[in-house]
């Protein structure tokens, strides 16, 4: 049977089962869903969930790279290279979601901020974002002191 031409896209693999546990993540917080996050079915819509991931990782990034957020004096900045989001189950409005984030991978000039949203200990959504540290001339190595901090915040199934 001919399956047609080869696909020009690849899909993201299913997340590791440990990603579904809040214990895997070193940094936790909570956020209340807004009325405007709701879709016509009374659930938080996908765009709203990604916005919650975005805020979670921005708060995390500001903690790790505070100088990158001082716009007038910064010499380095973080830019997003790739975002992969897994929507796992519906979440109603109103609700308070637990946010969790950590480092999924650490490279020379980039790292993966891996976040999760939980409702009643059940994972609603996962997000992996590749962030690249840029200087004036392009990607620049992550400084040793920041690397040490990022290493301490890696995801682990042993927490």
Image (cartoon, rainbow, N blue to C red):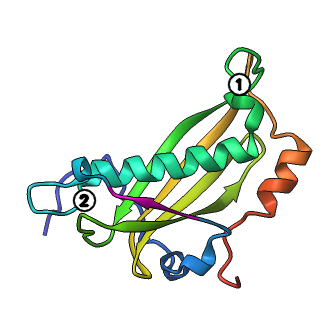
Q: What residue is shown with label 1?
A: 70
- Span colored in magenta: 29-33
For label 2, count other residues whose C-alpha is less than 10 Å away and answer few (under 14), some (14-19) or many (20+).
many
Q: Position of residue 68 (x, y in %)?
A: 71, 30
Q: Nearer the viewer, residue 10 or 140?
A: 140
Quadrant where the C terminus sits is: bottom right
For label 1, count other residues whose C-alpha is less than 10 Å away and answer few (under 14), some (14-19) or many (20+).
few
Q: How many marks?
A: 2
Q: Is residue 10 magenta?
A: no
Residue in view at x 70 percent, y 27 percent? 134
Residue in view at x 54 percent, y 37 percent? 80
Residue 98 visible in the current orientation: yes
User: Where is 147 relative to 94, above or below?
Assistant: above
Q: Position of residue 100 (x, y in %)?
A: 56, 65
Quadrant where the N terminus sits is: bottom left
Circle on res. 149: none
Q: Secondary structure at mark 1?
A: loop
Q: Secondary structure at mark 2?
A: loop
Q: Position of residue 125 (x, y in %)?
A: 39, 65
User: Where is 86 relative to 58, above or below?
Assistant: below
Residue 7 visible in the current orientation: no
Q: What residue is shown with label 2?
A: 44
């Amino acid at each position: 049977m001919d399956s047609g031409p080869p696909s020009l896209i690849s899909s993201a693999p299913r997340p590791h089962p440990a990603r579904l546990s809040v214990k895997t993540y070193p940094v936790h917080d909570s956020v209340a869903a807004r009325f405007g996050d709701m879709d016509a079915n009374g659930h938080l819509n996908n765009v709203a969930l990604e916005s919650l991931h975005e805020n979670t990782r921005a708060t995390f990034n500001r903690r790790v790279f505070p100088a990158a957020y001082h716009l007038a004096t910064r010499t380095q900045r973080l830019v997003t290279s790739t975002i992969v989001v897994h929507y796992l189950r519906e979440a109603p409005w109103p609700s308070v979601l637990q946010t969790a984030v950590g480092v999924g991978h650490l490279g020379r000039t980039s790292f993966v901020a891996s976040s999760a949203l939980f409702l009643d200990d059940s994972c609603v959504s996962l997000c992996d974002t590749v962030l690249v540290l840029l200087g004036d001339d392009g990607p620049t190595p992550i400084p040793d002191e920041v690397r040490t901090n990022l290493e301490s915040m890696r995801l682990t199934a042993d927490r």
